[in-house]
């Protein structure tokens, strides 16, 4: 699909994407806090099942697929407005690089210099943004082939490089480029293989959505997304790969990501985005329940960095929290941060969206 075609009704924003990002951001607190502050052994809590295992896992995939969708939509809108291609390219690449640098800065100050170049979600999203720009310039067929290659090769590559990883020890020589590349590609929470398939899929899915809006075939797009997404989710469940979620804390939940999750992640993204797209963008429903998620999504970078790196040390001054709190206390902590971020987001909007990491990112890129 040509992303620079003119449309009778120019697309300014797709609300479903904003809301999906906001729900994923809202889930960060209960997913992480229940994991850090509640006991897992001998019996996990219902909060861990619900917020970390089931909802957290599903919306984690949505969160890391959205960069590919957002870049595709940005390119479409910007090209329709006649923005210079080189300016677009520089802006997108700078944004991705800045996110990678932010991740390394957080690593340095939160752990120790030894962990500076550890790979994690912000660095993954940063690289995803950069690569998504270049993926959108390739054919649909090539991207599908790339996704299939990633899915097929990921377990093989993991097997080949696993001995190398073990022989060099889990944390040894983190400054070595070969250790860094091995961890980045295979051995972290967000490895390039297979998770690079997600932003590639995101570019394809966003293009299909844009094309459906242009041709006024939105309902066909939604129906196909729900059917195909539902089939992928059910296929994952019936092949028993869902076992590690339902039987939390399954050993696989804490080991390296299983490579069969990719099809499940595609299904989750298609179902979640299609449902929100139908409710908000097609039916035009502006329910009040969506408003906090719109705010959380708009400050998702600020929420992630502060709740993950800044606030846990402060909580440790008030509690001895590590797997030692009650469910009620964890819920209170989550509710406190939900309220704080909502109030901050409202004030942030009223002050021209200044003084946040999103604002810094915009200024620099």
Image (tube, rainbow, N blue to C red):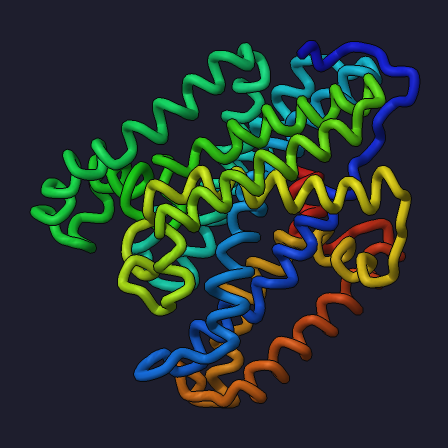
Task: Tell me where residue 75 appears, x and y as whole percent.
Answer: 70, 22
Residue at x 47%, y 83% (from the top left corner): 316
Q: Is residue 318 left or right of residue 6?
A: left
Task: Tell me where residue 321 appears, x and y as whole percent.
Answer: 44, 85
* Between 296 and 95, the one nearer to me in the picture: 296
Residue at x 36%, y 50% (from the top left corner): 241
Whether residue 298 is visible here, answered yes or no, is yes
Going by the picture, which residue comes out furthest to the front? Answer: 238
Q: Is residue 258 left or right of residue 69?
A: left
Task: Tell me where residue 24 appears, x and y as whole percent.
Answer: 62, 55
Task: Tell me where residue 356 appears, x and y as whole percent.
Answer: 70, 54
335, above or below 326, in the image: above
9, above or below 251, in the image: above
Q: Quadrant of the C terminus?
A: top right
Residue at x 65%, y 42% (from the top left corner): 361
* Between 178 and 71, the one nearer to me in the picture: 71
Q: Is residue 3 left or right of residue 279?
A: left
153, above or below 235, in the image: above
Q: Quadrant of the N terminus?
A: top right
């Amino acid at each position: 699909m040509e992303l620079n075609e003119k449309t009778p009704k120019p697309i300014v924003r797709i609300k479903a994407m904003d809301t999906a990002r906001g729900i994923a951001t809202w889930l960060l607190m209960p997913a992480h806090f229940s994991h850090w502050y509640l006991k897992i052994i001998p019996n996990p809590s219902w909060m861990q099942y619900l917020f970390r295992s089931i909802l957290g896992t599903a919306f984690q995939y949505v969160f890391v697929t959205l960069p590919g969708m957002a870049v595709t939509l940005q390119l479409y809108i910007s090209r329709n407005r006649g923005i210079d291609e080189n300016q677009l390219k520089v802006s997108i690449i700078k944004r991705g690089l800045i996110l990678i640098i932010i991740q390394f800065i957080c690593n340095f100050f939160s752990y120790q210099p030894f962990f500076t170049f550890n790979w994690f979600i912000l660095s993954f999203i940063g690289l995803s943004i950069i690569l998504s720009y270049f993926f959108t310039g390739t054919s649909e067929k090539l991207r599908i082939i790339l996704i299939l290659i990633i899915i097929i090769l990921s377990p093989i590559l993991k097997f080949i490089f696993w001995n190398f990883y073990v022989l060099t020890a889990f944390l040894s020589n983190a400054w070595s480029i070969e250790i860094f590349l091995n961890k980045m590609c295979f051995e972290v929470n967000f490895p390039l293989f297979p998770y690079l398939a997600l932003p590639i899929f995101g570019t394809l899915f966003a293009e299909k959505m844009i094309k459906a809006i242009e041709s006024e075939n939105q309902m066909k797009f939604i129906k196909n997304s729900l059917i195909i997404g539902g089939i992928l989710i059910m296929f994952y469940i019936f092949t028993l790969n869902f076992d590690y979620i339902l039987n939390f804390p399954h050993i696989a939940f804490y080991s390296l990501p299983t490579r069969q999750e990719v099809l499940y992640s595609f299904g989750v993204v298609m179902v979640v985005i299609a449902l929100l797209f139908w409710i908000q963008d097609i039916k035009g429903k502006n329910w009040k329940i969506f408003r906090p998620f719109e705010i959380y999504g708009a400050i998702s970078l600020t929420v992630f960095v502060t709740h993950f790196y800044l606030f846990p040390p402060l909580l440790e001054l008030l509690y001895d929290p590590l797997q030692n709190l009650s469910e009620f206390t964890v819920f209170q902590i989550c509710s406190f941060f939900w309220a704080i971020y909502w109030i901050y987001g409202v004030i942030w909007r009223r002050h021209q969206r200044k003084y946040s990491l999103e604002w810094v990112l915009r200024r620099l890129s």
